[in-house]
Image: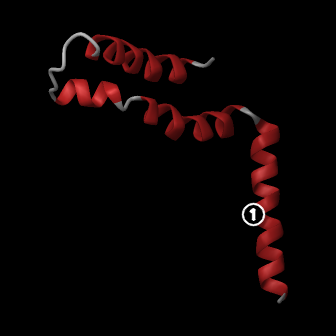
Amino acid sequence: MNAASLVSFVPYFAISLSQTYDNTSNAWVVFAKYSFVINSTLNPFIIGFFNTEFRRFIVDSILCCRRRLGNS
Protein backbone atom coordinates (compact mmCIF):
# COMPACT_ATOMS: atom_id res chain seq x y z
CA MET A 1 0.00 0.00 0.00
CA ASN A 2 1.52 3.30 -1.01
CA ALA A 3 1.35 6.57 0.89
CA ALA A 4 -1.37 8.00 -1.39
CA SER A 5 -3.63 5.07 -0.55
CA LEU A 6 -3.04 5.48 3.14
CA VAL A 7 -3.56 9.25 3.07
CA SER A 8 -6.74 8.95 1.06
CA PHE A 9 -8.44 6.02 2.76
CA VAL A 10 -7.80 6.85 6.43
CA PRO A 11 -9.98 10.01 6.39
CA TYR A 12 -12.70 8.11 4.55
CA PHE A 13 -12.78 5.31 7.12
CA ALA A 14 -12.61 7.74 10.04
CA ILE A 15 -15.54 9.79 8.72
CA SER A 16 -17.51 6.68 7.82
CA LEU A 17 -17.13 5.33 11.34
CA SER A 18 -17.96 8.66 12.96
CA GLN A 19 -20.99 9.19 10.70
CA THR A 20 -22.63 6.16 12.25
CA TYR A 21 -22.81 8.06 15.54
CA ASP A 22 -23.09 11.69 14.42
CA ASN A 23 -24.65 12.93 11.17
CA THR A 24 -23.16 16.44 11.09
CA SER A 25 -21.80 17.49 7.71
CA ASN A 26 -19.49 20.35 6.82
CA ALA A 27 -17.01 20.93 3.99
CA TRP A 28 -14.16 19.00 5.65
CA VAL A 29 -16.40 16.02 6.34
CA VAL A 30 -17.54 15.93 2.73
CA PHE A 31 -13.93 16.24 1.51
CA ALA A 32 -12.76 13.46 3.83
CA LYS A 33 -15.70 11.26 2.89
CA TYR A 34 -14.74 11.40 -0.79
CA SER A 35 -10.97 11.36 -0.27
CA PHE A 36 -10.75 7.88 -1.75
CA VAL A 37 -11.15 9.56 -5.15
CA ILE A 38 -7.70 11.09 -4.61
CA ASN A 39 -6.24 7.60 -4.55
CA SER A 40 -7.90 6.63 -7.82
CA THR A 41 -6.68 9.84 -9.42
CA LEU A 42 -3.09 9.70 -8.18
CA ASN A 43 -2.30 6.01 -8.63
CA PRO A 44 -1.83 6.06 -12.43
CA PHE A 45 0.56 9.01 -12.11
CA ILE A 46 2.48 7.40 -9.26
CA ILE A 47 2.78 4.12 -11.14
CA GLY A 48 3.77 5.90 -14.34
CA PHE A 49 6.40 7.98 -12.60
CA PHE A 50 8.10 5.20 -10.65
CA ASN A 51 7.64 2.13 -12.86
CA THR A 52 9.78 2.36 -16.00
CA GLU A 53 8.34 -0.84 -17.49
CA PHE A 54 4.78 0.57 -17.23
CA ARG A 55 5.94 3.89 -18.68
CA ARG A 56 7.61 2.11 -21.60
CA PHE A 57 4.43 0.07 -22.26
CA ILE A 58 2.28 3.23 -22.36
CA VAL A 59 4.69 5.01 -24.71
CA ASP A 60 4.88 1.98 -27.00
CA SER A 61 1.09 1.68 -27.02
CA ILE A 62 0.67 5.34 -27.96
CA LEU A 63 3.29 5.11 -30.68
CA CYS A 64 1.69 1.93 -32.04
CA CYS A 65 -1.70 3.65 -32.28
CA ARG A 66 -0.11 6.68 -33.94
CA ARG A 67 1.55 4.48 -36.56
CA ARG A 68 -1.75 2.69 -37.28
CA LEU A 69 -3.64 5.96 -37.65
CA GLY A 70 -0.89 7.47 -39.79
CA ASN A 71 -0.78 4.50 -42.19
CA SER A 72 -4.52 4.22 -42.79
Q: Is residue 29 shown above or below 66? A: above
Residue projecting furthest to the bottom: 72
In this picture, residue 32 sits left or right of residue 1: left
Q: Residue 35 at what x, y percent from top left?
A: 39, 29
At horizontal 69% and vertical 31% (from top left) the residue drawn is 50
Q: Is residue 26 shown above or below 42? A: above
Foreground residue, 63 or 26? 26
The image quadrant where one finds the N terminus is: top right
In this picture, residue 15 sits left or right of residue 63: left
Foreground residue, 26 or 43? 26
The image quadrant where one finds the C terminus is: bottom right
Q: Is residue 60 shown above or below 65? A: above
Foreground residue, 70 or 43? 43
At horizontal 36% and vertical 32% (from top left) the residue drawn is 34
Number of labelled discs? 1
Q: Secondary structure at mark 1?
A: helix
Q: Residue 45 at what x, y percent from top left?
A: 59, 40
At horizontal 83% and vertical 68% (from top left) the residue drawn is 64
